[in-house]
Amino acid sequence: MKTVPKLTLEDARGIMDAAEQRSREIGVDMDIAIADDGGHLLMFHRMDGARITSIDIAISKAFTAAAARRSTRSYAQTGLPGGPAYGIHVSNQCRFMVIPGGLPIFVDHQIVGGIGCSSGHCDQDESVAQAGVDAFLRGLKK
């Protein structure tokens, strides 16, 4: 039997707080989603000015990061026509996201979840997601 770490609701709250703080720092209200290791939604927050059209995108980015165990940025080139991952965006009920802004969350090389952010440009989305991951990892070191 294998014992694996699990992301808790308390963990998700800390990730969300840090991501929202970063979003405010850069001045872009975001849709922020946090998924568990299977890509299932644990928490979602839509800031007041976040785009309604970005809700599903943020959730799909979190799903992709957790389920694929890699950043959604890694699909930006490979998911294009002719790329080795082309077509992935229409798999899993069209939930795979091939644009940056989704990051996996690992503890001791074990996937525990993913975070997806959307409403800004790709680098802003990824920056907000990274702030959440970084805060979570800092919390583990305490």
Image (cartoon, helix red, strand yellow):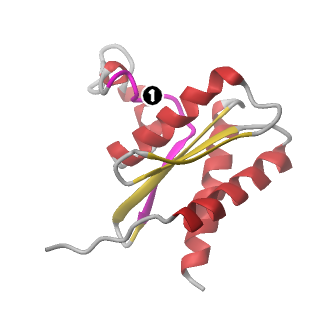
At mark 1, the secondary structure is loop
Picture quadrant of residue 16 = bottom right
Compared to residue 24, the image places residue 10 above or below, namely below
Magenta residue span: 93-106
Compared to residue 2, the image places residue 58 above or below, namely above
Q: Residue at x 36, y 71 (%)?
A: 5
Residue 115 shown left or right of residue 108 in the figure: right
Judging depth in this view, the residue of 139 and 1 nearest the camera is: 1
Residue 14 percent location from the top left of the image = 65, 64
Instruction: Tell me if I can see residue 86 in this picture.
Output: no
- Asked if the magenta segment contains residue 102, the reply would be yes
Q: What residue would you read off at disc 1?
A: 98
Q: Residue at x 43, y 40 (%)?
A: 63
Judging depth in this view, the residue of 125 and 5 nearest the camera is: 5
Picture quadrant of residue 75 = top left
Residue 10 shown left or right of residue 75 in the figure: right
Q: Quadrant of the C terminus?
A: bottom right
Quick one: which residue is furthest to the top in this view?
A: 81
Q: Residue at x 41, y 38 (%)?
A: 64
Q: Residue at x 33, y 43 (%)?
A: 68
Residue 141 percent location from the top left of the image = 56, 82
Query: Which amino acid is tagged 1?
Result: Val
Crowd rating for badge 1 (residues with CA inside 10 Å; few <14, some 14–19, many 20+):
many
Quick one: which residue is furthest to the bottom in this view?
A: 142
- Asked if the magenta segment contains residue 83, the reply would be no
Residue 65 percent location from the top left of the image = 43, 44
Instruction: Tell me if I can see residue 35 in this picture.
Output: yes
Judging depth in this view, the residue of 12 and 139 nearest the camera is: 12
Quick one: which residue is furthest to the left in this view?
A: 1
Residue 21 shown left or right of residue 62 in the figure: right
